[in-house]
Amino acid sequence: WKDERAASMRYIAKSYIQKGDPAQARSWFFRAAAEAPHLREPWMDLATLCYQQENWDGVLYFTGVALAITVRPDEGYVLDEIAVYDSDGDEIALNYKAGYDVILMDIEMKFMDGMTAAEMIRQKDAEVVIIFITNLPQYAIKGYAVDALDYVLKPVSYYAFSQRINRAITRMSRRQKRYLSVTTREGTHKLAYDSINYIEVQAHELVYHTTDGIVTAPGTLKEVEKTLDMQIFFRCNKGCLVNLERVDGIRGDDAVVAGEPVLVSRSRKKVFLDALNNYISGVAK
């Protein structure tokens, strides 16, 4: 993400300031501004550097550039509502109702600690993203027991916080339902991605093997590949697309897809295994 790369460059620049090398600091601030031109911060960093050097023309110029930035690009998500519970973990855990996307929770609280509260929340909501905030990194391992996405160490920096929030947004986007419209002779079917096990060619038609049964429709795999998200689906042989989410394992030259063996051609086996590994790693993040 450009914002995070720019933040990293600004940290490097500030380190050069601490080392007494303003020329290198200036160079890194310019890199940060070029990386994320929609941000005001790098320009204000340059203005601050000019102020420290009593370069008043520079102060005027860089603050002017910062003030001219009035629009941020679309972030791809909308913040609808924030609920704040500032008393204790029991306030949210005991009265919790599923519906939140992300919960930022302190671990150390007076009556009910964050880990216990998270366990209670998980009993009611398996989907909500939980991020712990703590000054005790040893609690990070315990977070796996409640499927916490990550933790942020106090004091919380903008860079660390933005990284975790971006990961949370990525996870939320993956769980959003996506559909494929399939037109058959009987009409149009709306197939959820996660309901499709695999798609194969039979007698010049496409056969969709789904969790609800088989759907047959005219078409080609090449046409379907243009419609599907090919980070989730993979062509394992000349006549078959498999849903990586539905792959249970590998048995010899076959992928076991929802309990059924599907041939993986020798020429594509390594690429298939790499795609499967990348998919699993991406879902786990």
Image (spheres, rainbow, N blue to C red):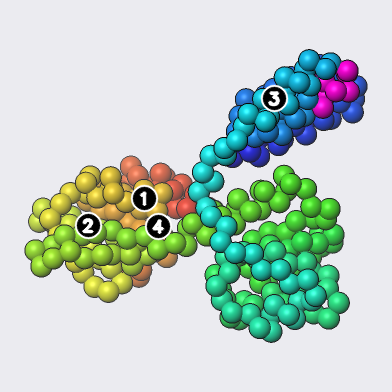
Front residue of this view, candidates 74 and 275: 74
* Residue 53 colored in magenta in the image: yes
Mark 3, residue position: 64
Instruction: Classify residue 150 by image quadrant.
Output: bottom right
Q: Main secondary structure of the magenta part?
A: helix
What residue sits 78% from the left and 25% below the top? 47
Crowd rating for badge 1 (residues with CA inside 10 Å; few <14, some 14–19, many 20+): few
Q: Earlier in the sequence, mark 3 or mark 1?
A: 3
Mark 4, residue position: 244
Check disc 3 and give the amino acid type. Answer: Gly
Q: Nearer the viewer, mark 4 or mark 1?
A: 1
Number of numbered discs on residues? 4
Quarter of the image containing the C terminus?
Answer: bottom right
Mark 1, residue position: 229
* Residue 218 colored in magenta in the image: no
What residue sits 26% from the left and 65% below the top? 190
Q: Earlier in the sequence, mark 3 or mark 2?
A: 3
Q: Secondary structure at mark 3?
A: helix
Q: Nearer the viewer, mark 3 or mark 1?
A: 3
